Every structure is written in C-alpha cells, then in structure tokens.
C-alpha cells in the first residue's frame, strides 16, 4: 500500500498500463508539458514521448471521435477531457458513435476507449464547468460509466477501464484530486465494474452516494450516530453496470433508503435506484425512499449559491431522520 | 483615419481594461476573488479598436478572456468587478463570475466559457440583423485555439453562404493555455482558413491599434454592403498567465518580457498619439490615472456589495411573464 492523492493514483495507473501495453496512449488538451490542468499526466511525456502523451488541438469532437477510430483499429486510447462538461461538445461521437458502434455493426467492432476527466462543484467554475453529467451517459446503452470516490477506487477502476474492451466514461471529481488514500501497489490491482462498496455498515437506514457524496454521506452517518441512527453507506462506484443487488440487500436489512447525488435531482440516477428498490424490496420498505440531488437550476458561480444548489450534509441527515420517523 | 475623439476613446478604454484587470489580479492574489480569471493584458488594442466602431446596437460575443471585450462594449467597471466577486450587484447577479459577463442592453451577448461557444451565437445575431434589415453588424471574438473547434468552421461556412453581416475576429495570442499555435493549428496564418470558406481573410498586427482599426473598418463596410463575413486575425500575445496562478512553465520568460516591455499595445499607441501631436503625454497620463481611480472605485463597490440571497437561486431559470 502507498498513500497517494487521487490525481497521483490516476497518473500512476496510466503510466503502468502504458508500460504494460504499448497500444495504450493518451490524448487531450494540455497534457504534455502542463501534464493536464490537474496533473494527471504530469511528466509522462518524458517517459513515453509525445506520440503517446499527445496534445490535441481544442477539438473535442475530433479527439473523441479519433479515439473511437483508433480503438476500432486496435489501439487502446485514453482521451482526457479537461472538464467532463466538454463531453457535450463531443456528444455525437460519444453517444451516436462510441456507444453504438459495436452493436450496429453486429458485434464486429471492439472499442477499448476510455474518456476521462473531472466534473463537479468546488472551484467556482460556474454553470458550464461545474456540472455532474454521469447520469446522462447512463441513459445510452453501450458505454460503461465509472465514478471513483477515492484514490484507491480511482486506481482500481481506471485499470479495469483501460483493460476493458468497451468504451468507458470515467468521471473524476475536481474536489477529490488532492485527497489522499491508501492505494494497493499491485500492478494488476483492478476493481471489477458493477460491484458497489459498503463504506460503513449500519442497520437503520441505507444511504447511497457517489463521488464527493460518499464522504458527505459518511459525514452525515457520523452525525446520525450521535442521535442513535445507525446508517449504512454504499458507494456504487460504477453507474454502468450498476450493482443494484447490494443496495437492495441493504434495504432489506434497514427498510429505509436515502439516495443522494450532486447531479440534478430531476431524472437523476437516484430516481432509478428508488425505482429499482421499490421493485426489488417493496415489502421491506418502512418509509418512502428519499432522493436528493441538485436543484433544477444551472450551477451558479457565487459559492453560497453553489452550496445552496447541491445537497448539504445537513439535508442528508434530515432525510435519514425523516425516513426513520425521527 | 481615426478621429481624434475616437483615438481618445480607444486610449481610455485600453487603460480601463488594463487597470480593471490588474485590480482583479490583486484581489485574486488577496483571496478576495475566486474562480477562473483569464486576463487580457497585452491584447487590449483588439477589443478597443474593434468596439470603437460599433454602436450599442451592434452585437458581440466574447470568450473566457472576455473582460476587454465587455468593457470596450460598454460594461461599467463596478458591475463587472462585482460580477467577478460573485456579488448581487454584478452583471449576472453573481451567478456567473469572470467568464460570463453579458449586457444585452449594450449588444454584448456574452462572454462564453466554452471555447468556440460564442461563434455560432454571433452568427445567429448577424442572421437576425439580416432578416430584420436593420444595418447592425455582429462581431465574434475568439482565440487561436477556438479556430480548431468545429463551431468555428461551421459558422464561417454558414455566414459565408448566407452572406451575413458578421466579422470574425480571431485573437491569435500564440497559445491555447500551454499549447503553442504551431503545435495545434495547421496553418501559419489563421486568416488563411478564410479561403476554405470563400471569404476575405486578413492578418494584422494585433498590438497596433491602427492596423486592427483599418482591417475592421474594411470588414464592416463589406458586411453592411451585404457582401458577407470577413475573418480578421490579430496577431498578439498575452503577457500574463493563461489564468491567474498560471506558473507559465511552457514558455520562455524572455519572450514574455520582450512582448511586455517592447510591444505593449497601450505604450505603442500612446507613443503614436504623442508623436502625431494628437495629445500630450501629460494628457494621456491623466487618462491612465483616471482609469486607476475608476478601477479602485470598482473594487470598493464590489467589496461593499451584498452577496446574492441563496433563497433567489432558482430565479431566472425560465422566463416568466
Ligand atoms: C470546449 C472547451 N474546450 C476546452 C476548454 C478549456 N479551455 C479554456 S481556455 C482554453 C484555451 C483557449 O485558447 P484560445 O482559444 O487560443 O484562447 P486564449 O485563452 O489564448 O485567449 C481551453 C483549452 C473550454 N473552456 N471549452
Ligand atoms: Mg490563444
């Protein structure tokens, strides 16, 4: 084990996988000399050269599309988007091309492509640079979606993503890059997709959250403990495939569910979790599940407004108390 | 020929932009201002020379590096500074910060944090002007880096086939963040790209007010005559970091110093004005002093302004009659 930041964990896995497989390469904006604006490719061009750590023009549609094409032709590209908000500039290449290519060609194509970058609140980047977009990519069959909440998960999930023969959208969180965590040194450390992690076991209420909301859910659990509510906190870790079973099993035990995410509440993935839990554990539910997410307005710049738009730890606590009739 | 009055206006605007931004940089360094702040220092000639030929009825769209365009298009420093600080009195009521200043009453359809995002919007404003036959023109400001986005190419073609009254003003400052133009861009002169769309393309010294002014004057004539768009590439250099806090390890300090010390557009313009006998150095120094005072006052205004009320955060998502 080594204690690493989330950013370093990502960088190290990219380097290790590039050493292991010469077909792995990275392209993105400002990833050579600058090492990416969060340092996830810092100095890698020195070891791998600028053929494999490749600066692109500011042309997101072309670079994502080139990733799809290179993958079809046998490479294993990692495309870094500086902000995952820019997936929207490249949306056709992701949604109509990467996600569908294998299926529409009758299973002939293989697209081992990783599209990774950061998203979310915390740096005053305002409406077009602070969104949480994992939900929308869950809607389109054919792309896997990962959301690591700490450095170890970032490492294990990214390695799995790079070795996967399907397109993977890899959503990092800008507010997590500096956070440190023990990361296994094993060069084959992989976390399988579709396996949620129970971050804290508890018997009274199940709280599901991802990315930044794992630590916020854990904070809420610590608050709840003070008033005698024992919360179980679950991090799904990947959104596609989604480990609904672990959540349903948990709700069978606790009888109560709170789902929280930074993505907008409306049509957010939390609604899907509630729907599946109602389906799979209806008779175990003691209270109507609560789904928390960002308000239906763009992310504002002012920090007090930004905080007012996304769910707070206090709101998670209140929701848990409510489902526990407290 | 630029009238004396207009020269004065241009000089004044360039100084307002410069001192507004230096003040913003100071506030950022003092942790009084946060977010992504992209400074325009060294590029002021472009915004000032272009906007001096526009009225409040003409349109612009701007970029993440938008303070200069916005001020030249009539933004008041105090409301702009208040927006940078996220205050209720700011242009966007604190909703948007540095990268999104807009003032529709002045024809400023907004700075834009998405690279290339404003280019089609200016094209649409030009389409409206054409449909409304109102003699307005639209200007899209954007960087060298943005000329590699699809929106740039699609907009040039659209504006060309529809003969829209728009001027595409590319500010080639040598870099897109850390990436030098030569590494990202297939042509030496971005204006060469105009050829592909059958429109005129010119490259001018973007630090020379007169050169930018003349190229733009010609382009506006063409636009108003119904002959369609022009692409003007202004070669310039940003003398500060890409954003506040940029370590700038990707470029040679000597280059920065050379541009800053020998090609500063404000100093160059000042010299031309004094040499031509338009104004005395003392008169121009006064303009500079006044700009400093105005920037300081804007900061005071912003600092003393209230934060927006979180209770209002849902306002303005939709228009409600
Ligand atoms: C679609 C999109 N891609 C990438 C970015 C990140 N980004 C912000 S500014 C910038 C560089 C822009 O370069 P250029 O157009 O030359 O403008 P300059 O910053 O030099 O004024 C980049 C890559 C963005 N904001 N939007
Ligand atoms: Mg540039």
Image (cartoon, rainbow, N blue to C red):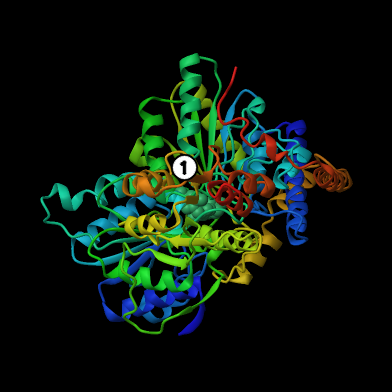
Q: Is residue B116 left or right of residue A315?
A: left
Percent position of residue B85, x then y: 73, 47
Q: Residue B141 lies in what quarter of the image?
A: top right
Q: Residue A223 lies in what quarter of the image?
A: bottom right
- Residue found at x 36% / y 68%: A157
Percent position of residue A259, x then y: 47, 50
Q: Is residue A95 above or below residue B138?
A: below
Q: Secondary structure at mark 1?
A: loop
Nearest to the observer: residue A5 or residue B83: A5
Percent position of residue B189, x then y: 44, 51
Q: Is residue B66 above or below residue A220?
A: above
Nearest to the observer: residue A153 or residue A281: A281
Q: Residue B47 lies in what quarter of the image?
A: top right
Q: Is residue A289 left or right of residue A325?
A: left
Q: Quadrant of the C terminus of chain B?
A: top right
Question: Quick check: can you spot residue B235?
Answer: no
Q: Where is mark 1, residue-wise?
A: A288
Percent position of residue B247, x then y: 62, 69
- Residue found at x 74% / y 52%: B24
- In the displayed orientation, state which residue is furthest to the top: B133
Q: Quadrant of the N terminus of chain B?
A: top right
The crowding category of the residue bearing disc 1, from other C-alpha atoms within 10 Å (few below 14, some 14 to 19, many at least 20), is some
Q: In the rendered structure, the residue with mark 1 lies on which chain?
A: A
- Residue found at x 38% / y 44%: B150
Question: Quick check: can you spot residue B283?
Answer: yes
Nearest to the observer: residue A254 or residue B203: A254
Q: Is residue B18 left or right of residue A119?
A: right
């Amino acid at each position: 084990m080594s204690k690493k930041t989330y950013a370093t964990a990502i960088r190290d896995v990219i380097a290790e996988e590039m050493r292991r497989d010469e077909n792995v390469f990275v392209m993105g904006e400002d990833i050579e000399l600058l090492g990416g604006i969060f340092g996830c490719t810092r100095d890698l061009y020195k070891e791998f050269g600028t053929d494999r750590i490749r600066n692109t023009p500011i042309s997101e549609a072309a670079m994502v599309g080139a990733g799809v094409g290179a993958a079809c032709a046998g490479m294993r590209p990692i495309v870094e988007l500086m902000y995952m908000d820019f997936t929207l500039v490249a949306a056709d290449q992701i949604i109509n091309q990467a996600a569908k290519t294998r299926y529409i060609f009758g299973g002939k194509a293989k697209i081992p492509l990783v599209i990774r970058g950061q998203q979310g609140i915390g740096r005053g980047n305002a409406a077009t640079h602070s969104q949480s977009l994992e939900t929308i990519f869950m809607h389109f069959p054919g792309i896997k979606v990962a959301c690591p909440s700490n450095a170890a998960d970032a490492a294990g999930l990214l390695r799995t993503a790079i070795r996967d023969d399907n397109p993977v959208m890899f959503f990092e969180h800008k507010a997590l890059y500096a956070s440190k965590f023990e990361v296994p040194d094993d060069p084959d450390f992989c976390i399988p997709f579709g396996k949620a992690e129970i971050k804290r076991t508890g018997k009274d209420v199940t709280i599901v959250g991802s990315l930044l909301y794992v630590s916020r859910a854990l904070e809420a659990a610590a608050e709840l403990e003070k008033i005698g509510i024992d919360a179980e906190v679950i991090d799904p870790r990947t959104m596609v495939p989604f480990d609904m079973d672990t959540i349903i099993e948990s709700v069978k035990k606790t009888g109560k569910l709170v789902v929280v995410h930074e993505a907008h509440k409306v049509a957010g993935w939390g609604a899907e979790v509630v729907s599946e839990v109602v389906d799979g554990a209806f008779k175990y539910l003691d209270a109507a599940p609560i789904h928390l997410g960002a308000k239906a307005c763009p992310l504002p710049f002012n920090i007090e407004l930004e905080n007012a738009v996304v769910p707070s730890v206090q709101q998670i606590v209140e929701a848990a108390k409510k489902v526990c009739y407290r | 020929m630029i009238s004396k009055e207009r020269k004065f206006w241009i000089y004044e605007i360039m100084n307002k932009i410069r001192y507004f931004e230096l003040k913003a940089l100071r506030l950022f360094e003092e942790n009084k201002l946060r977010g992504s702040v992209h400074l325009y220092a060294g590029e002021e000639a472009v915004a000032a020379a272009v906007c001096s030929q526009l009225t409040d009825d003409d349109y612009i769209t701007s970029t993440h590096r938008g303070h200069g365009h916005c001020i030249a298009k009539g933004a008041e420093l105090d409301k702009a500074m208040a927006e940078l600080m996220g205050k209720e009195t700011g242009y966007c009521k604190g909703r948007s910060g540095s990268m999104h200043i807009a003032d529709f009453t002045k024809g400023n359809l907004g700075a834009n944090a998405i690279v290339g995002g404003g280019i089609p919007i200016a094209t649409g404003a030009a389409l409206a002007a054409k449909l409304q036959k109102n003699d307005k023109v639209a200007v899209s400001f954007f960087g060298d880096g943005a000329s590699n986005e699809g929106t740039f190419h699609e907009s040039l073609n659209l504006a060309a086939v529809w003969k829209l009254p728009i001027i595409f003003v590319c500010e080639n400052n040598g870099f897109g963040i850390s990436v030098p133009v030569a590494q990202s861009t297939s042509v030496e002169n971005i204006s060469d790209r105009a050829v592909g769309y059958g429109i005129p393309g010119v490259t001018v010294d973007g630090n020379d007010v007169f050169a930018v002014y003349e190229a733009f004057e010609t382009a506006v004539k063409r636009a108003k005559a119904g002959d369609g768009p022009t692409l003007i590439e202004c070669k310039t250099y940003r003398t500060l970091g890409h954003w506040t806090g940029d370590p700038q390890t990707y470029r040679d300090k000597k280059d920065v110093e050379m541009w800053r010390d020998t090609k500063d557009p404000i100093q160059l313009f000042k010299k031309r004005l004094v040499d031509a006998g338009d104004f005395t150095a003392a008169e121009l120094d006064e303009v500079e002093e006044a700009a400093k005072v105005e920037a300081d006052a804007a900061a005071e205004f912003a600092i003393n302004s209230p934060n927006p009320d979180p209770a209002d955060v849902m306002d303005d998502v939709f228009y409600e009659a």
